[in-house]
Amino acid sequence: MANAENAKLQYEAGQTSYAVSALTDSGDATTFDSSAALFSKKSGYAPDVRPNGLITGGAVIPAVSGTNDLIDVAALTCYLAGVKTPVAADTDVAITRAVTTDTHNITSITVTSAGAIAAVSGTDGTAFSETRGAAGGPPFIPVGSIEIAQVRTTSNTAAPITSDEIFAVVGIHQERYDYPIFDIDYANAEVGFASALPLIHTGSLPKAVYASYAAPVFADVSLASDFVPAETSHSVSSTQVYGSTIGSSSSSLGQASFTAYLNDGVGDALVGLKNETLWFKFFPDRYKAPYILTQGKLGISRTFPAGDNVQAACTISAESESVEVNA
């Protein structure tokens, strides 16, 4: 039978900050990895995820001047390379119609990586296609650019652009920073999107995803005991019906907890972090690799006995179960 005589408990005592930088596509255009092993969630250090994309504005309309093959673009804000960037309105932006005997052409209206409005023409076709780069399809746009709309023309004869030739459906013709929605995985230090990002950039690449974040720096809780991980408990309730009984199960996540023995209960570093959301790392055996990770809000209840050690009953209010790591 094993015991925890040689156990060790560590807490997130500090953070290593990473400036805004591009995350790495894991290969499925859905999960994007960072340079950290864990994401801190301590106040002031939680990740700030900024995918390239439109934030506000950017409406595309037929040119007010009424001139053939021109559109106007309203002022907008967007995230470019992790920076919130204002882009001024632009007028009389030229659209390229089909120039061959074919009639159908799609022009993407974009914000360039330099923060300017640009029109990118697709390949002429006899009909529209939804395949990027195909004849009659929307063009691939440069890496680092943002698509805000498409203009679809069906004639190679010059004419004013009409509103029904302009398309700006989010996720199809327009890249927004907040679509598709994403979750932050603190335990794996990555960002996961609800669906794969469209591969609309040159080289069949998705839009870039940027973030600033921090990784935890751990220190030992010098004197600790009785660690309990955050785990899910299950219960069953039953209802008696005529001739039988029906049951249902429910689950609840319990708090993690431990006892810390303090110096004076006031100036201790751990006490100074009460009510913060922190990572905790528990090693059942300090001389072996496996450990348990728990992230949650630290609660402290101190006692100051006259004839015993100052101590704190600590709770970790986690949003998910503790994780076993067999490193």
Image: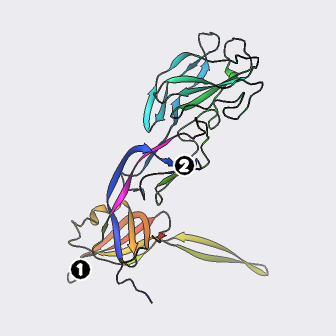
Mark 2 residue type: Phe
The dominant secondary structure in magenta is strand
The percent position of residue 118, horizontal first and vertical second, equals: 54, 23
* Mark 2 / mark 1, whichever is N-terminal: 2
Mark 1 residue type: Asn
Q: Residue furthest bottom?
A: 1
Q: Is residue 112 magenta?
A: no
Q: Residue furthest right?
A: 243
Magenta segment: 204-217
Out of 226 and 51, give the one closest to the viewer: 51
SS of the residue under disc 1 = loop
SS of the residue under disc 2 = strand
Q: Is residue 61 left or right of residue 189?
A: right
Q: State the quadrant of the C terminus.
A: bottom left
Q: State the quadrant of the N terminus.
A: bottom left
Residue located at (73% from left, 17% from top): 100
Asked if the residue at tag 1 contacts the one at tag 2, i.e. Cβ–Cβ closer than 8 Å, the answer is no
The percent position of residue 142, horizontal first and vertical second, equals: 55, 31
Q: Quadrant of residue 312?
A: bottom left
How many marks on residues? 2
Out of 150 and 272, give the one closest to the viewer: 150
Mark in front: 2 vs 1: 2
Which residue position is annotated with label 2? 182
Q: Is residue 130 left or right of residue 53?
A: right
Which residue position is annotated with label 1? 309
Q: CA distance from mark 2 to mark 1?
A: 47 Å
Q: Is residue 208 magenta?
A: yes
The percent position of residue 246, horizontal first and vertical second, equals: 72, 76
Q: Quadrant of residue 239?
A: bottom right
